[in-house]
Each structure stands twice: as C-alpha cells, then as structure tokens.
Image: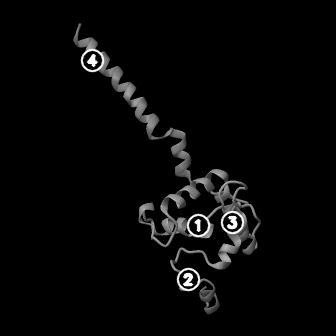
Amino acid sequence: MWTASNRRQYERAGLRYPSDLTDAEWGLVAPLIAPAKHGGRRRTVDTREVLNAIFYVLSTGCQWRALPKDLPPRSTANHYLGLWIWDGTLERIHEALFTAVRAQEGRAAEPSAAIIDSQSVRGAEKGGRGSTRRAMTRTRRSKARSAISSSTR
C-alpha cells in the first residue's frame, strides 16, 4: 500500500531521467562493479553514468543510437554492457539485489519452490516446431520420389 513515506522514498522527481540511479541505489551497486585495471590509461568514464545509460536504453526501449548526449557515448555504454555480461558483473549485481530483496521480505535467499507450466512441458516432449518440420519434409520428399518413380514406369 502506498503511504506518504513510501512515496517519498521511491520518488524519482529529482533525477535527470526516471531510469537514473539514486544515491542509495548506487550505494548498493557500486561495490559490485570491478575497479579499473592497474596499468595502462586511467579510466575516464564514470561507471555510474554508464549504468544510467544502460538503464535508460532498457527502460525506454530506445536504440543505442538514440541515447541522449548528456549520457556517455553509445559505444562506451554498449562496450561496458558487453564487458559486464562477459565477466559476470551483471550476474553478481542481480544475485546481490535478489537476495537483498528476499531478505527484506523475510524469505530465504534461495526459492524453495518452482512452478512448471504444463504447456512448456508438453511442447518439450514433442520436440518443437523445427523437428516436426524436418520430419514432414522427409515424408514429402519420399512421397514425391515414389510418385516420380511410379510415373516413369
């Protein structure tokens, strides 16, 4: 239920974009992002702004090319997204936030039950559309070959 204190806590009016991280949110995520590597050029990009750019694309559904000019360039944001997927940073962030939310709700860190949709199970037993199409193609070819061979006799 929304109360006045809840509304104040989740208010995003002071942010540049609704998808930007608040200071409290950044405080949770910042320790999970790896620091810059030693040696070479120093990191000049602000990783908070890169994360804001990624969240902007995800929340608006816009193309990378349509990123606003006050966010990092699209190539930088896209590069960091790929890097964070590759090195597991996004997975670590997701896992940390997931367990924090479950702990806040008074639940165990790992879910204790799972639900399997019967439609999904049924579809898996059949083998899906691709294997059905291949089997039907073989049948059509063999029928066509038998029709050709019988007409030539």
The residue at 63%/85% (across/down) is 9
Whichever of callouts 2 and 1 sits on the residue coming sooner in the sequence is 2
Mark 2: secondary structure: loop
Q: Mark 3 points at which residue?
A: 98
The residue at 31%/16% (across/down) is 146
Closer to us: mark 3 or mark 2?
Answer: 2
Q: Which amino acid does the dot numbered 4 rest on?
A: Ala
Q: Which amino acid does the dot numbered 3 rest on?
A: Phe
Whichever of callouts 4 and 3 sits on the residue coming sooner in the sequence is 3
> Do the numbered discs 2 and 1 sit on residues whose CB atoms are within 8 Å?
no
Up-down relation of residue 107 to residue 136 (above or below): below
Whichever of callouts 1 and 3 sits on the residue coming sooner in the sequence is 1
Q: Name the residue under label 1.
A: 51
Residue nearest the viewer, comparing 22 with 131: 22
Whichever of callouts 3 and 2 sits on the residue coming sooner in the sequence is 2
Q: Distance between the residues labelled 4 and 3?
A: 61 Å
Closer to us: mark 2 or mark 1?
Answer: 1
Instruction: Give the quadrant of the N terminus.
Output: bottom right
User: x%, y% of residue 45?
Assistant: 60, 65
Up-down relation of residue 152 to residue 123 (above or below): above
| Residue 12 - label | 2
Mark 4: secondary structure: helix
Q: Residues within 10 Å of mark 4 (few under 14, many from 20)?
A: few
Whichever of callouts 2 and 4 sits on the residue coming sooner in the sequence is 2
Closer to us: mark 2 or mark 4?
Answer: 2
Q: Which amino acid does the dot numbered 1 rest on?
A: Leu
Q: Mark 4 points at which residue?
A: 147
Closer to us: mark 4 or mark 1?
Answer: 1
